[in-house]
Image (spheres, grey):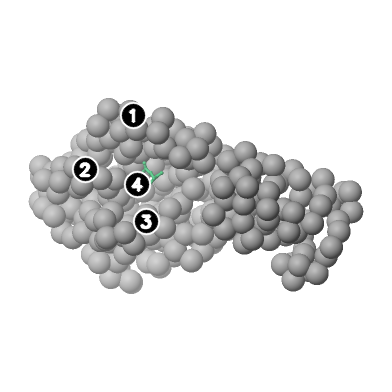
Amino acid sequence: MTVSGVISRLEGAGIVNPKQEALWLMSHAIGATHTQLLARDSFTDDEAGKIEAVISRRVSGEPLQYILGVADFYGRDFAVGPGVLIPRHDTETLIDGVKKVFAHDEAFRFLDWGTGSGCLAVTILLEFPNASGAAVDVSGEALSYARENAERWGVVDRAEFGDNGGEFALIVSNPPYIPSCEIAGLQREIRDFEPTLALDGGHDGMRYYRELQGLAMMRLKRGGYLVLEAGDLGQVRELCGMEGFTLAGKILDGGNFPRCIIMRRN
Ligand code: GLN
């Protein structure tokens, strides 16, 4: 086994950044730096076995972040693994959305509905030192990652896990929004490895937005904000017209899609 052999295998499996991934995966497997790896022309049987274990997972289509056990969100590492949705860069627009409507030192209580890895809740707690928030998820596995990430980033004292009742000034959510009929056509890395529960938004992808609207009418203060991730333009249109709310802003993602929709409760 050689570094260049691993790179060619990843390339052959259709991995877009084979060299970068080879170095990340190999260094994760045997604890060597990239420079050390590049200087090696052979590996012991023990090392080769460890490397093979991670490379074969990657070649089978498993997402890199599950194998490494971490994903970047807003410039910080979050623990992830099978059973929890991998944070997406597009979702960082929701943090920018919250920053648009709350000042840095403002004290407010929020709800992160469908928290997954906890990337949104933990990042809000880090970016707003006087905020406190509740992270909820139907998946117990996801909640345990959210708790781990809150501990990793030292915000557990301002976090609640589960719904303890009360009102919120902000409800933030990246709910499952992919229409059920589109799940089978997703790329293999997502479809076969990430939790369908975190992706499938029912026949029109709107199922959880409707739940969120109902929840917000009961639990979001008047004048409070609902900051949501949207999946397509039809959803954007429906969200912007949500009864009982007024559009307070949109944030574009890297592809110029209005990924984050900010609605203010009337
Ligand atoms: N943006 C995610 C994807 O493309 C979907 C996340 C979601 O349904 N909230 O896989």
Looking at the image, is mark 2 or mark 3 earlier in the sequence?
3
Q: Is residue 29 left or right of residue 115?
A: right
Quadrant for ligand 1 reads top left
Q: Secondary structure at mark 2?
A: helix
Mark seen at residue 235: 2
Percent position (x, y) of residue 178? 33, 37
Distance from the alpha carbon under mark 2 to that under mark 3: 16 Å
Asked if 214 appears above or below 36 in the picture, the reply is above
Distance from the alpha carbon under mark 2 to that under mark 1: 14 Å
Viewer can see residue 135: yes
Binning the other alpha carbons within 10 Å of mark 1 as few (below 14), some (14 to 19) or many (20 upward) gives: some
**How many numbered callouts?**
4
Kind of residue at badge 2: Gln
- In the picture of the structure, the residue carrying the numbered disc 4 is 174
Percent position (x, y) of residue 263? 18, 53
- In the picture of the structure, the residue carrying the numbered disc 3 is 90
Percent position (x, y) of residue 44? 89, 53
Mark seen at residue 180: 1
